[in-house]
Every structure is written in C-alpha cells, then in structure tokens.
Amino acid sequence: MKFTHTIAFKLFLVTVTVQTLILAALTFASIRVQQSNLMDHVVQSAVRVSDMIARSTRHSMMLNQKEDVHQIIASVGGEPGIAGIRIYNKQGVVAFGTNPADLSTQVDMNAEACVSCHSVGLENPHASNRTLTRIFADPGGERVLGLITPIRNEAQCSDAACHAHEAKKTILGVLDVKMSLAQVDHGLEQNTRQLLVLSMGAVLLIGLVSGAFIWMFVRRPVKRLAIGMEMVTSGQLNHRLDFWASDELGQLARRFNIMTEELARAREENVAWSETLEAKVKQKTADLEEAHKQMVRVEKMVSLGNLASSVAHELNNPLEGILTFARLLIKRIRKTSLPQEQIDSYCDDLRLMADESQRCGDIVKNLLVFARQGGMAFQTIRVRTIVERCALLVNHYAQMHSAQVAITCTDEDEITCDPGQIQQVLIALMMNAVEAMSAPSGSAGGGSLAVDVQRVRGNLVFRVSDNGMGMNDDVKAHIFEPFFTTKSEGKGVGLGLAIAYGIIERHHGTIEVESAAGKGTTFTVTLPVVPPSESTQHIQEKPLEGART
C-alpha cells in the first residue's frame, strides 16, 4: 500500500492543514492588531507633538512675535519623523511653516486639509477641540500622517492688545502637522516578516511533532495490526501482538491476540476432529469389511451346512448297512470249517471294513451336528458344575499326555444356557489344548492346561490356555473353518472347532483365539449371563470358520 493512501498520512495531512490555517488566521489577526495598536500609538504621539507645537507657539502668537513662532516651528520641524509643519490663517494662507516656499501661499479650499475641517463642522463654536488625522502618500511614495488641529479664537486672543480678533470668529487658523510613517511602515514590515517566519516555524514544528505522534501512536500500531492480520490470513495463528497501550488501539491489539488464540484453538480442534474422523472412518471401514467378510462367510457356511446335511443323510444309511453286514459276515465266517488262519485273515479284513465304516459314520454324525438347525434347551445352571464335569471327562486323557489341569472358578456364578452344548465346546477346547502340548512323536509333553472363568460386566468369560506349540497366523486364519485340521490323516476331520463356533454363536457369544508359534494358545469364550428371550433361541446355526482338532 502506498504511504499516501494510509490513514496515518491522511490524518497527518488534515492535522497540518488545519493547524496551518489556524496559525495563518492568528498571524494575520496579530499583524492587524499590531498595526492598529502601532498606528494608535503613532497618532497619539502625533497628537502630543501637535499639542506641544500649539502650546509652544501660543505665547508668542499672543505677543505677535512671529519670529519666535518661526523658530519654534523650525526647531520642532527638524525633529526626526516630522515631515512638515504649517499654520494656515482663516483665509487659507500659510502663515508659518517649515518649508519657506510655502509661506504666504494660498491653499486651495478644496484641498484635503480644508475639506477635512469643514466636513466635520469644526467652525461650529460648540464643536470640541478635536484633532483630525489623515494618511496620504507623498511624492516619494512614502506614507504620511497628517494632523489637522484648529486654532480657535479664545478670549485671550480676542481681548489681546496686540491684535484683537472679533469674538464672533470661532476659528483663527489651522495647525497642520505632517509626520512621516516610513519608519513605522519599516517596523511593521519587519514585524510582519518575523511573525510569518515564526508562524512557518511553528507550522513546521507542529507538523513534525504531529507527524511523530501519529507515526508512534497511530501508524506503527495500525501497521502491526495490518501485518498481524496478513499473517493470520496466511494461516500463522501463533502470531501475537506485543503492543499493550491502554488506548483503543491497545484494546484492539488485546482483542486481536484473543481472537488468534481462539482461532488457533478452533483449528487444533478441527484438526483433531478431522484426525478422529479419519480414524473413525477407517475403523468403520474395517468394521464394514469385517461385516462383509462375515456375511460372505455366513453365506458360504450356510451352503456348506446344507450340503453337509444332505450328504450326511444320504451316506448314513449305506454306511450303516456296510457296518451291519461286515459284523454279520464275521460271525458267519467264524462258524465255517475253514482253516483258522484263513478265518482270522477274513475276520481281520471284515473288522477293517467295519472300523472304516464306523469312522465314516462318525464323520457323518459330525456333519449332522454341524448342519443341525434345531432348538436348544436353555436352563440356569452353576458355571462351576459345567467346568468340573468337563475337567472330570478330560482329566484321564490329560494324565495320559502328562498334562496338568488347573481350574479357577467361583461357586456363585450362574448362567442361562444349554449345558450340554457349552460342555461340548469346553471339552473340544480342552482336548485340543492337551493334544497341542504333546510332542510330535506322541510322547508326553508335560504341559499345563488352565481354565479360568470370570464375570465381566454382565458376561462370563471362559479362558482355556495351554503352553503348547501354538499356531502361526496362517493356521489361526482358518481354525474355525470346517474340515480344516492340523492333525495327521485319520485322526480328525476338522469339525470340532467349527461346531464349537456355531454353538457359541447360537448363545449370542463370541469366541476368540490368541496364539503364537511356540508360545501356547488361549481361547477366550464370552457368553451373556442372561441370553435374549426364548423367541430368539431357535436360531439358525451360523457357518463357522474351520477347526483345529
């Protein structure tokens, strides 16, 4: 911004202009007053000089001593500032004067001096003895002050022995004193020049003082505010003004700092809100992705469940027939007369067929359990009862693998559930834990199995932990999927954890796993103490993610 466009320059220009006009008016008035006072002083001095001449010549005129009057007028007329002295008689003839050339000359009655006297009526006997003044220019161009003083016919004049005048005459003559105003004009000119110089100096000084004041108390604060606003506009909300005057600009600076603080705080809140919103969006996106995966999983598991149910029903009858006829053939062969070695060989083959048929039957049974969509028998039972029953069933199997079982559970906690299905879940988790603590060769691993039950905000949390071989991330991603197993061929079909997952889902609970290779595994099952109403108990079994058996 140009300096001439700033408010400080405009204020300075207005201030200096107003002050210049005021000082000019005061200077002009002072000159006029000084001129008037000086002229009054000059006129009073001239009047005193005229009165002095009249008094000085009065006695000589009374005695008709004209030579003395000439000497007096010549002496006074030689004083500095006296331009000339003349005395006119009644007829306008110059009787006495400082200029010899003017003596005995007739003055024009229309001259300035004559007109001045007659115009004011000085010939009136009742008029006061007043002195008339006039100012005119001499042939040299200098101003001259003329004083016209009438010489009246006093009683001493009319009764004097030397020359008597008739008493009816009022004016005997006129004393005309001319005083030069050259020195006065020169003094006025010098005074005027000095006043103008002083006035210009005063204007300059006031302008400098006003400019400095405006610069210090207006220009600099306003510029700081302007710079601060530009910085705030550019986003630098940490900028603060250090101008703390007690005037309006100081208050404005304080308000500006408060404003920037509020803006900075609002921006921080907006940034934090944006970051929070971004995190929430990411979280919701992840939840939606997880929900989508869950829906895909549900659809897949529903299809698998329907397929498993159909296959199980179709395979169950043929397998049952094979098993029955294999056992029947064993009984018949034993009654034949064949050699014993041949009978034993045939029976071994038939028992193998029966065992494999039985194993296939177990697989079909698990498929039916996995695909089951029937209701559940809910009842309220002590949690400790379920956990102790599971420990009793698993304890012998744990001893065979040199594993120790520890249970932590209170006696007071109760839960409304299907006890048989919850027992099935816990047994599956505990059996898997015992097997995970066995060495690969099948020898005893000497592990530790812990079952801990706690009540947390209206839920019961079951934690089944072992210190076995653990799982890597790839295995954890598939453990709840049906037919997924880490056991060797023939030792599991991968439906145990899938069935457990479905049972927990039907109880409106959750099952989670934490594990790392070589650091053991912990399954966490969370169940509500009081499940939803019975109208929601008969729900379709949701598909599961896989099994670790």
Image (tube, rainbow, N blue to C red):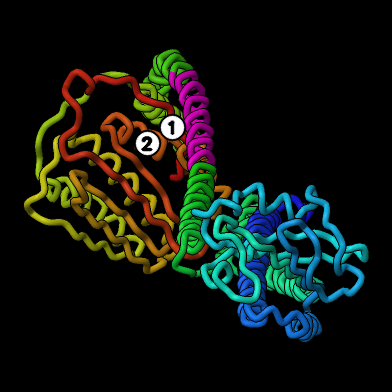
Q: Amino acid at mark 2?
A: Tyr
From what the image shows, is residue 415 above or below residue 401?
A: above
Residue 231: percent from left, percent from top: 65, 57
Residue 468: percent from left, percent from top: 43, 62
From what the image shows, is residue 479 above or below residue 295?
A: below
> Is 101 in front, or is 546?
101
> Is 95 in front, or is 535?
95
Tag of residue 524: none
Q: Amino acid at mark 1?
A: Leu
The residue at the point 30 percent across, 54 percent down is 463
User: Which of the two discs, 1 and 2, labels the residue nearer the N terminus?
Assistant: 2
Q: Which residue is mark 2?
A: 501
Magenta stretch prevailing secondary structure: helix
Tag of residue 544: 1
Residue at the far front: name it.
Answer: 161
Residue 378: percent from left, percent from top: 15, 29
> Is 396 in front, or is 91?
91
* Residues in magenta, as a range: 280-305
Question: How many numbered marks are there?
Answer: 2
Any part of residue 428 in sight: yes
Any part of residue 185 in sight: no
